[in-house]
Amino acid sequence: MNIAEILSISVNEDNLAWKEGATMPIEYVAALSAASEIGSDLLRVRAMDKQAHKRVVLLLAHKAQMSGKRKRLFLSPAMAQIFAVCAIHEITQPQCLACHGAKVMITEKLKVICHSCGGIGLHRYSDKDRAKMCGLTVEAWPQWEPRYKMVMEILVSNDTAALFAKNRLGK
């Protein structure tokens, strides 16, 4: 069952009882209530919800612009949206590009550790990767990097409560 199915069952459940050692339906609703609007939408993005993706891009871009004004790291609406899309991609698609998170590749009778990720299954985004993803040159990246980091900080801070809830509930 994916997160959308679990939540729809949980919201319609009328059993509010608590049971030792078991995750009850009401706990899913309570756990997500601790998440921010961006965090809960990001959880839905991971479940391939396209509407949630549009919402989280717009919300994140708006928050980044407001935060940027306070920190004197100005972002145009277009650049804020580009950074939001790239940051969301980086957070929701952490798998290695070569092995797709498998960590090893099996060929005939050999089990080969992925050379790209070193067997950890994750892609480590470099400045070059981020610049390319955002449509910028590597030379221009240093002036944009603080703005991108700001967007990532906003996203990660909003993602933490939803991920904590998901991990706590084991789904």
Image: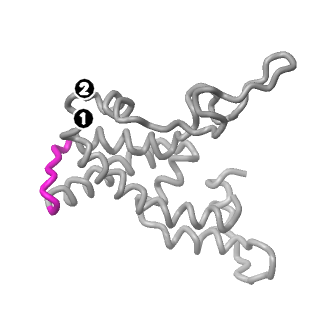
- In terms of secondary structure, what is the magenta stretch mainly? loop
Could you tell me if the residues under marks 2 and 1 are in contact, i.e. CB atoms within 8 Å?
A: yes
Mark 2 element type? loop
- Residue bounds of the magenta highlight: 70-77
Q: Which residue is mark 2?
A: 137
Residue density around tag 1, few if under 14, some if 14–19, many if 20 or more, within 10 Å: some
Where the C terminus falls, by quadrant? bottom right
Question: Residue farthest to the right?
Answer: 109
Residue at the image point whose x is 28% and y is 50% from the top: 61
Horizontal and vertical percent position of residue 3: 63, 55
Q: Which residue is mark 1?
A: 141
Q: Is residue 72 magenta?
A: yes
171 over 47 or under it: above or below: below
Using the rendered view, name the quadrant where residue 18 is placed: bottom right
Mark 1 element type? helix
Position of residue 102 in the picture relative to residue 80 (left or right) = right
Hey, what amino acid is under mark 2?
Thr
Residue at the image point whose x is 58% and y is 46% from the top: 47
Residue 38 got which mark? none
